[in-house]
Amino acid sequence: MLEFRYDTQLLIEGKQLDENAIHAYISEHFKGDCLLAVGDEELIKIHFHTNEPWRVLEYCASLGEIYDIVIEDMDRQARGLRG
């Protein structure tokens, strides 16, 4: 069993986005690992392993429009299951 089950990826489109501030907020407020928050003031790509992807989505949606959302169950992948 993995410590953090869900690979959570998305894009945030907005204005005056700060990748360092977003990275710091996610690190401080959500349990997980493998965090990436990269981009510029208008578009940030998020990649994060967590057990509560809905909390990450809620936070990111507060910053701008979120899209290209992918949440993959890495436990299912590790067991060779599809879907």
Image: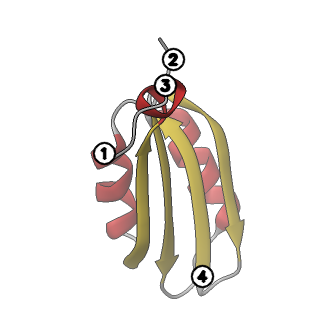
- The amino acid type found where label 1 is placed reads Arg
State which tag comes first along the sequence, 1 or 4.
Answer: 4
Q: Position of residue 71 (x, y in %)?
A: 40, 51
Q: Which residue is mark 2?
A: 2
Q: CA distance from mark 4 to mark 3?
A: 26 Å
* Figure check: 36 above or below 28: below
- The amino acid type found where label 3 is placed reads Phe
Q: Which residue is mark 4?
A: 43
Q: CA distance from mark 3 to mark 1?
A: 14 Å
Secondary structure of the residue carrying numbered label 1: helix
Q: Depth check: give the residue in front, 74 or 15.
A: 74
Q: CA distance from mark 4 to mark 2?
A: 30 Å
Q: CA distance from mark 1 to mark 4?
A: 20 Å
**Marks 3 and 2 close (CB-CB < 8 Å):** yes
Q: Which residue is mark 1?
A: 55
State which tag comes first along the sequence, 2 or 1.
Answer: 2
Q: Which residue is mark 3?
A: 4
Within the image, what quadrant is residue 55 found in?
A: top left
